[in-house]
């Protein structure tokens, strides 16, 4: 079984977001980390590999910045290959463009399953898995966990709103958006990553930037404070009296 894990680097949430003079996000001034959901997808792939030793795990990322460390870290965790897709593009790719670039690479490969995080914190779009599957005309499922390989396909659990879940069997090749791995993502030391950097290499594959429909960003701006919160303290009786008074004042409670 051959698994491909799609990885993306996203802004570190501890960073302060700043805007440029033309009302765009100052992306070059931010620190980047692997998307936490992609880390879950990688862990699920490695767990499948542990259950089926003949499985190979490849990680792929678009060259939108300094993604080498993210790929070497994936190799240190147990991935077999790392691929970086290079071309004339930057961080401002839409998810449609990202999916099209990934599809270019996948059409020349022979993977059984593609795993990607269900979403990423920089857009919360959650569409990469579906878009990629649509371009490849492969089966697809998102918000997925407990992926297991069987002769008739991959068995998985898909989560729905309201706490409902479904057990599904998906034929391969397929694209899956991973919500959570069966175990927390494994940790590797900096020393091990540095060791991998000396002994392993990242494959570079050139891809052409596609022409796809996209939404144009007109303006970004920080929210403006319109008011403030009034703290009522911790005394229950006082809080109840003030809440009742407020509801009466707003004509939401009859006397």
Image (cartoon, grey):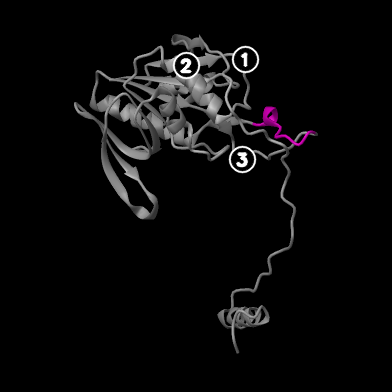
What span is colored magenta in the figure? 22-30
User: Closer to the observer: label 1 or label 3?
Assistant: 1
* Residue 73 image offset from top left, x and y in percent: 46, 23
* Residue closest to the eye, 236 or 129: 129
Residue at the limit of the structure toward the right, as seen here: 21
In which quadrant of the rendered view does residue 172 lie? top left
Label 1: which secondary element: loop
Q: Which residue is mark 2?
A: 104
Estimate how packed mark 3 is, as few (under 14), some (14 to 19) or many (20 or more) residues with alpha carbons within 10 Å. Answer: few
Residue drawn at x 59%, y 82% as measured from the top left: 253
Does any portion of residue 154 appear in the rendered image?
Answer: yes
The residue wearing badge 1 is 88
State the CA–CA distance, disc 1 to disc 3.
29 Å
Compare marks 2 and 3 and give the one earlier in the sequence: 3
Determine whether 57 is above or below 176 in the image: above
- Between the C-alphas of marks 2 and 3, the distance is 34 Å
Figure disc tally: 3
**To which quarter of the image does residue 16 belong?**
top right
Q: Mark 2 or mark 1: which comes first in sequence?
A: 1
Q: Is residue 46 magenta?
A: no
The quarter of the picture where the C terminus appears is bottom right
Q: Give residue 125's position: percent from left, percent from top.
A: 52, 39
Q: Do labels 2 and 1 touch, CB within 8 Å?
A: no
SS for dot 3:
loop
- Give the residue at x 34% y 30%: 139
Residue 232 position, x and y percent, is 64, 74
Q: Which residue is mark 3?
A: 14
Horizontally, residue 36 falls left or right of residue 19, namely: left
2 or 1: mark nearer the eye:
2
Residue 84 versus residue 6 in the image, above or below? above
């Amino acid at each position: 079984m051959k698994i491909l894990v799609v990885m993306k680097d996203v802004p570190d949430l501890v960073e302060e977001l700043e805007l440029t003079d033309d009302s765009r996000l100052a992306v070059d001034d931010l620190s980047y980390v692997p998307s936490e959901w992609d880390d879950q997808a990688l862990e699920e792939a490695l767990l499948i590999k542990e259950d089926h030793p003949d499985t190979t795990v490849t990680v792929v990322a678009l060259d939108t910045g300094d993604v080498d460390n993210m790929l070497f870290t994936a190799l240190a965790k147990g991935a077999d290959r790392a691929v970086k897709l290079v071309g004339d593009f930057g961080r401002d790719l839409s998810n449609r463009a990202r999916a099209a670039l990934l599809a270019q690479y996948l059409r020349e490969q022979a993977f059984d399953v593609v795993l990607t995080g269900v979403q990423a914190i920089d857009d919360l779009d959650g569409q990469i898995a579906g878009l990629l599957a649509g371009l490849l005309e492969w089966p697809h499922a998102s918000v997925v966990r407990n992926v297991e390989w069987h002769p008739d396909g991959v068995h998985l659990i898909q989560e729905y709103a309201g706490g409902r879940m479904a057990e599904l069997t998906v034929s391969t090749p397929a694209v899956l958006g991973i919500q959570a791995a069966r175990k927390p993502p494994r940790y590797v030391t900096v020393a091990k990553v540095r060791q991998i950097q000396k002994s392993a290499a990242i494959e570079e594959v050139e891809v052409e930037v596609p022409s796809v429909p996209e939404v144009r960003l007109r303006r970004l701006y920080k929210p403006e404070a319109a008011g403030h919160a009034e703290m009522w303290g911790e005394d229950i009786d006082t809080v109840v009296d003030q809440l009742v008074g407020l509801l009466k004042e707003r004509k939401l409670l009859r006397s």
